[in-house]
Amino acid sequence: MFAVYDYTTSKESLKQMVTLQKNTFSFLINGSKEVFSNKQNVSIQNDYFLLMKKGRCLMTEKIISSDSDTYRSILFFFSNETILNFIKNKKISFNKNPELKSSVFSFSYDAFIRSFVSSLIEISKLSSDLQSSLLVSKFDELLTYLITVNGSGFIDSLLYELHNENQHFIEVIETNKLNKLTLKELSFLSNMSLSSFKREFQKHFQTSPSKWFLEQRLEHSAILLQDKSVRPTDIFEEIGYENLSNFIQAFKLKFGMTPKQYQSS
């Protein structure tokens, strides 16, 4: 039900496709971490740690040279069953349809959490049987503390299960419409093959993914350009164009004027 792992690597990863079999605390020690899920993307450095719901995500792990020459994170795995047991024993009410339905939560370190992580590191060096016994109480300790400090909303969200596949698909698309994810990465987050993803996309949006995402990014660029101090050269890469001329051409095709004309209109 529980496991702890001291993960260290000298290699960076970029949007690695990861399937978490259990819910996971990632206590970042060295480096930076970014996670794309079906609902949001979260980026942290080592003054924060993450709680990630089991399922699929894209994970980027980078080394910060001023920090260390390695990436290091203490991973604490636990099942949904352990959460149910926790809320039952603590008599915590569970909202089966929470307003907040996040897949990833970030928390800031404090003195208590840093001490807690140090204890996990020591536990990770012990035998598996002894680890199992100790991690039961450590899990109880951690959740009790986080609920006291942050409230229990993240517990409700962890236990919320998406029964509606269409809802899950739409969440992936809407959450990542301005992120530079490939169709392969989006299909992975949607729990689909690439061909199924394209068919489902066409069914929902009546257009191809490439055209739809292009439209969304151009509309976003128009919003950005409402700020007169923003220049086209400042934003064309942000919305997914490799060069300025292609952005200007696409913008003019959609809005009937160049970005500069749009700003002065």
Image: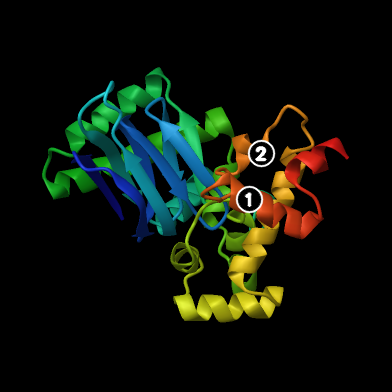
Q: Inspect the image, locate mark 2, and give the three-letter code of the amino acid beneath it.
A: Pro
Q: Examine the image and state in which quarter residue 188 appears.
A: bottom left
Secondary-structure class at tag 2 = helix
| Residue closer to the observer: 169 or 216 | 216
* Side (left or right) of 224 relative to 74: right
Residue pictured at 47% horizontal, 74% vertical: 192
| Residue closer to the observer: 212 or 148 | 212
Residue pictured at 46% horizontal, 53% vertical: 53
Tell me the distance, in whole angstroms, between the alpha carbons under discs 1 and 2: 8 Å
| Residue closer to the observer: 100 or 261 | 261
Residue 30 is labelled as: none
Give the vertical position of 194 relative to 110 (above or below).
Answer: below
According to the picture, the residue beneath numbered tag 1 turns out to be: 247
x and y percentages locating residue 96 in the rendered image: 64, 58
The reply to whether dot 1 and dot 2 touch (C-beta < 8 Å) is yes
Q: Inspect the image, locate mark 1, and give the three-letter code of the amino acid beneath it.
A: Phe
According to the picture, the residue beneath numbered tag 2 turns out to be: 232
x and y percentages locating residue 14 in the rendered image: 35, 49
x and y percentages locating residue 72 in the rendered image: 25, 35
* Side (left or right) of 252 relative to 89: right
Does residue 216 show up?
yes
Callout 2: 10 Å neighbours few (<14), some, many (20+)?
some
Residue pictured at 31% horizontal, 55% vertical: 1
